[in-house]
Each structure stands twice: as C-alpha cells, then as structure tokens.
Image (cartoon, helix red, strand yellow):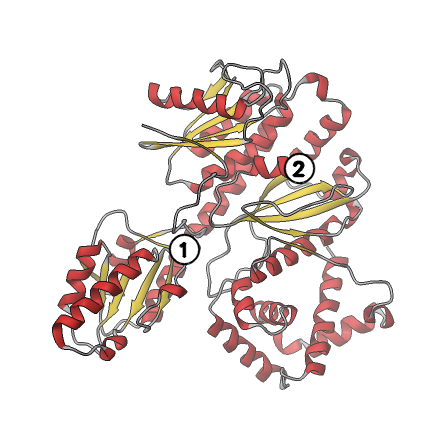
Amino acid sequence: MTSLSPTPPATAPRATPPPSTPPVPLAELLARTDLGLRQIAGPREGVAIHWVHTSEMADPVPYLLGGEMLLTAGMHLAEVTGGAPALESYLDGYAARTVAAGAAALGFGIAPVHDTVPAALVAACDRHGLPLVEVPAGTPFTAVESAVWQAVTEARHRELTRLSEAQRALAAAAARPDPAAAVLRALARHVRGWTALLAPDGTEHGSSGPRPADTVRAAAGRLAQVVGGDGGGAGAREGAAGPSSATDALPGAQLSAYALTGRGPGRQALALVVAADPHDPPAHTIAGVAAVLLSLITGPAGDRGPAATGHAAALVRLLVGARPAEVAPLLGAPLWTVVHAERRRETTGSAASLATALGTTLLAPEQETHPAATDAPPPGPALRALVPGDREIAAQPGWTLGVSAPVPVEELPAADRHAATALRRALAQHAPLVRHRAPGPHGIASLVSADDARQHARALLAPLSDSPPLLDTLHNWLSLHGNWDRTATSLGIHRNTVRQRISRIATLLDTDLDDADVRMELWFALRALDRDAATHR
C-alpha cells in the first residue's frame, strides 16, 4: 500500500536523510586492488558511501552526518577494562550507536594497535547490520579517503553534465511549435522514465516514455488530485488549495507531481507527473526545471499577456546560456534580486514549490554556488532564481537562501556572485537566509582609486596567485572572522585542512594572520580583486 505525501512532509523527517553528494558503492572500493580492503561482516548488497570520517573516540556519533565510512584503528579499545565480557558489551554498544548515527560502514585498520579485527566487533557488526571492512596495514586511511573523494568527484561530474544537458534540451524543447509535448518527450528521455500531464480527474493531456504499470498509473492519478487542490477537477476540496508538489513511493518507481497552473473556481488545474528510478536524485532536479517551463507553457490563456510571454522567453534564453543583458527587454522589472538556494538535508521540497514561494518563474538549477576545494567533492547542486526587486524575500522552510541586493539587469553577474557569497555564509552560520549588503558610498574602498587598489592587491597576494584553493580559503576564513569550523563548512573540507591551508598562506605571505591590521589589509586586497573580476566579466 502506498502513501501520498505532500512536499515538504508534514511529519518529522527521517533520522538520517541522505547527503547531497553522489554515493559510492562499497563494492567499488572493495574491488580496488590498490586498497586491499576486505569486508568481513554486515550486509554486502546496496551499501553506499557518501564520505569518510576518521575517529578514535569511544563515541563518534556527535560528529557523524550520516552516510560515512567511519575509519578507526581501535585505539579507544585500550580504555576498556573488565576482560572479554566488558569488551563485548562495549563493542556491541559502539556498533549500535554507529548504526543509529547513520554511518554506512565501519573500516577497522590493522596496525599499529591491533593485528586482527576483534572477533567481538565482527559479531557486533553482523548483529546490528553494520558493514565492517578490514583495512590492511599497508593502506593508510588517507588512501581510503582519497579513493572515496575521487569516486564522488567523478560521479558528481557525470551528474552535473547530465543536468546541464537536460537543462539545455528542455529549454530548446520549450521553444518548439508544440512546446508542451516536446518538453514531455525531452523530460522522459532525461529522467529515463514516464512523464504525463494529468488533470485532477485523471484525464491525460499528453505523456511520453514507457507506459507504466496500472498501479503506477493509478497512483499518478491520485497525485494529480492532491496537487489539483482548488482546481475544480475531481477530488478538489471547496475552498482548499492543494500543495504545489507531492510524491509517492512505489516498488521500483518514485512518483513526483507538480502543480502547473493557477488555481481558481472553474479551472482545470494540470499537474506534471513523473515516474522515475527512486535511486536517481538528479531526476527530481530535472523534473523541477520542466515543471517551471510547463507552468509557463500551459498557463491559462487569460493570464498570459505580453509580460508572461516575455518571462517565458527570458527563462528559455537564460537556460540556454544567454547573458542577462541580452534578455533585459523581456524581463520588464527595472531591478532584480538574485537568490541562491540549497535544500536542507531534511527536506524534499521541489524547485517548483520554491519558485511559487518566491513569486517567480525565473528559476533554474545552478551547478556550483561556491567553489569546490581540490581535496573535497563539489557541493550539491543549488537553485538560482531571479526575483523582481520590489518583492520581499523571506526565509523558506527547508531551504537555505543567499540573497543579493536588488540591481539593474546589467549588474546581474555581480549580484549572482553576491548571492553565492551570501549562501556560503548562510550555510556556514546555519542561518536560513543571509542578505548581501553592499558597502556605502563613503566606504574605505572609495578613498583609493580602482587601479591603485588592484595593483596593491596583486602585489600583496602574488604568492597565492597560482593557487585558487588557497585564495578561496583565505577569502572564506577572513569573511567568517577566522572561524575554523564555519570555514570548513563553507568550503566542504575538514577543519584541519583549513588550518593547514591558513598556515601555508601565512608562510607564503610571510605575515602574521593573527594581527588584525594584517587581516584588514588582506581583506581589502581580496575585495579589490573581487571588484576587478566583476568589472571584467
């Protein structure tokens, strides 16, 4: 029996929601002969690793996010006294806590502390369903970490390439003579599933892809009723507005439905329904882009004037890579705000629902909103939106937002970078929304000519010019007031990596980064480079 759940869910989320990074099958790591890993306990099928964490603490749970391979050399076992019974009890609790924290697997290193994996740990992992991997003496933990990050990076690159190709294909389809049918076909091809436009009474207004089983088709009809809300179709409730999106999980298929048209008395509110592989997260992002396009294409004719047509054309052109200035005549509003948004781990909110909440249809996936460090996987995809500058942007449940100041269209590239910076700060500070504040006309920067500031910045930061990761780390570290943890969160790297980079920066610059005057001068130089980059884009 299936259950219909509007997005976002009304009840508490799962204890360990999946991370945004692409998973790495444990079997892929076990197959690498250079690592020599061997699984000796726990389930063998369907185990996926999202990242790696090393800890010798007796209770690493507070430091786990879920989806990790937890690596340990068992140093904490030396603290257990009381003989074999006490060790068995300790290891049973250790395995149980690790599973409860959402760790995907446990890696136990042979040497320098233990010659073999304790038999009590093998039994505990089998008992609690925790995959246990033996890490041989010749394999350092850093090699395992590197292998996981390499696999994650490759998977993320494939995912981003797929999203970019799907985005372009959908935008091109929306510009064809029969746009709705063309978008459905393109969407079905790129999500590798079935797509349909359904009315609340189940009437099909177009579909593409392999015809699903009757059970899936029936569930799709129920989802169309859920998002139909006050649309006037079958199942609509008087005076009630349904959710913007809803999902349903069936064996072998994940159904997602998106409300496409405005609701009101007598309207036939269409829904986009997509049936795709439940283990294919990019399909959800691709469907969100299609939902925005189809909302524009299928909207009631009475509501679609020149402004709506212009917005549709602007969205299509932005999606296929046109510069913002080229679509300025179509956008209408004199000022626009750029919003960068990233889903929180506990939400499954769709792009379409966020667009509705922000009051815009100009929303598209963004491949990267903050720089990826060389020793970490790229961040998960975010969403980028253009919102008319006169609209107030508030925090949205389930999302983290970075918001630029309202700017004219020709300044959108700079506003886009400001929104990305604001999103990084919001993520680092665990804040739901951070706004970029432009400096006033009487700031320090106004006292120095742009040429002088640029020359000074390039001379001061010359030792870092060949290392973008070091520049990014310094920029983030200074913007977050030297906070190691927030900088690590912002860059998606370990705090020890931040410390190592800052130490390297201090050495290269031959300066004391604990000196407030030095920090101020470096920040001024970095901001001068930011302004120079904005001018030449």
For the point 21% across and 63% down, the residue is 92
Note whether residue 213 is visible: no
Indicate which disc residue 362 carries. Answer: 2
The residue to which callout 1 is attached is 152
Comparing 443 with 89, the one in front is 89
Write the residue at 86% across / 63% down. Answer: 441
Is residue 301 depicted above or below 471 in this figure?
A: above
Amino acid type indicated by mark 2: Leu
Which residue is located at x 63 percent, y 48 percent?
A: 395
Q: Quadrant of the N terminus?
A: top left
Query: How far apart are the alpha carbons under marks 1 and 2?
Result: 30 Å
Q: Quadrant of residue 50?
A: bottom left
Q: Nearer the viewer, mark 1 or mark 2?
A: 2
Disc with the residue nearer the chain's start (1 vs 2): 1
Decide if residue 157 is in sight here: yes
Give the left or right position of residue 275, taking residue 368 as reference: left
The quadrant holding residue 422 is bottom right
Query: Residue 518 at what x, y percent from top left?
Result: 69, 82
Label 2 secondary element:
loop
Q: Quadrant of the C terminus?
A: bottom right
Three-letter code, disc 1: Val
x and y, in percent, of residue 290 in the image: 55, 31
Would you place residue 512 above or below residue 386 in this image? Answer: below
